[in-house]
Image (cartoon, rainbow, N blue to C red):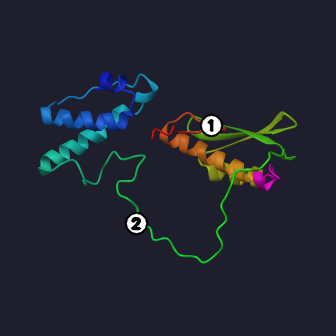
Amino acid sequence: MGNVTELLDSDSIGVNALLGGIAMELGASVLFTPEESGKTIGSVRELSITSDMMFLAKNRGSIPKDLGINMVLFKDKRKSEHINEDINVPVVNAEENYKFKHDPAGSFRIMVEHGKIKAVHYHKMEPQIAVMGKTAKAVYDEILKRGLISRMEHATYLGSELERAEIASKVGKTYVQDFPLFKKIY
């Protein structure tokens, strides 16, 4: 399994699910995969879940769908049927046009370390304190509590960057401040 995953520029979760299905159809009893490269990290767990799915499907005499477990991670299994409320207010088209203004309270360098979000506060180019937490909200709340931010637009920027850092830590992506997490492929 690992060789195919390694040689294909695609996320391992879908590749492992497909290969697991093929292995079930062929009657394979052992699935092997290493986790040597960045794109194969998590493959052992993915194959374990896939094996469970295929085992359940085979025993039920069904396809590996709607079993209570799945490998859908980045897309929703079904389209959302949310009803949009019709709120009668003027609509303003938003545009990006804000000019950066330095926050007198300082700035932050955000990173992900060992699955946690770390925001290092700098004042006058000198690091002052590092705030570390499991969630963006925990880090943001601590920053607010300590008064390390004074401008509304800086707070908005910081909140969005902390959220991106949290998403990166959850999905195993590398987080680099101010750069997108995902490439648009279509």
Residue bearing mark 2: 81
Q: Is residue 168 left or right of residue 20?
A: right
Residue at 59% across, 40% down = 116
What x and y, as percent, mark residue 154?
76, 50
Residue bearing mark 1: 179
**For residue 157, above or below residue 21:** below
**For residue 139, above or below residue 113:** below
Q: Is residue 90 left or right of residue 121?
A: left
Quadrant of the rendered structure where residue 93 is? Answer: bottom right
What x and y, as percent, mark residue 54?
21, 42
* Secondary structure found at label 2: loop
**For residue 8, above or below residue 185:** above
What x and y, as percent, mark residue 76?
39, 53
Mark 2 residue type: Glu
Residue at 28% across, 38% down = 17
**Residues in magenta?**
145-153
* Secondary structure found at label 1: loop
Q: Which mark is residue 39?
A: none
Which residue occupies the foreground of this view, 150 or 94?
A: 94
Residue 116 lies within the magenta run: no
Residue at 74% across, 52% down = 155
Which residue occupies the foreground of this view, 82 or 106?
A: 82
Helix, strand or loop for the magenta stretch, by majority: loop
Assign the N terminus to one quadrant of the image.
top left
Disc 2 and disc 1: Cα gap in Å? Answer: 32 Å
- Tag 1 or tag 2, which sits nearer the N-term? 2
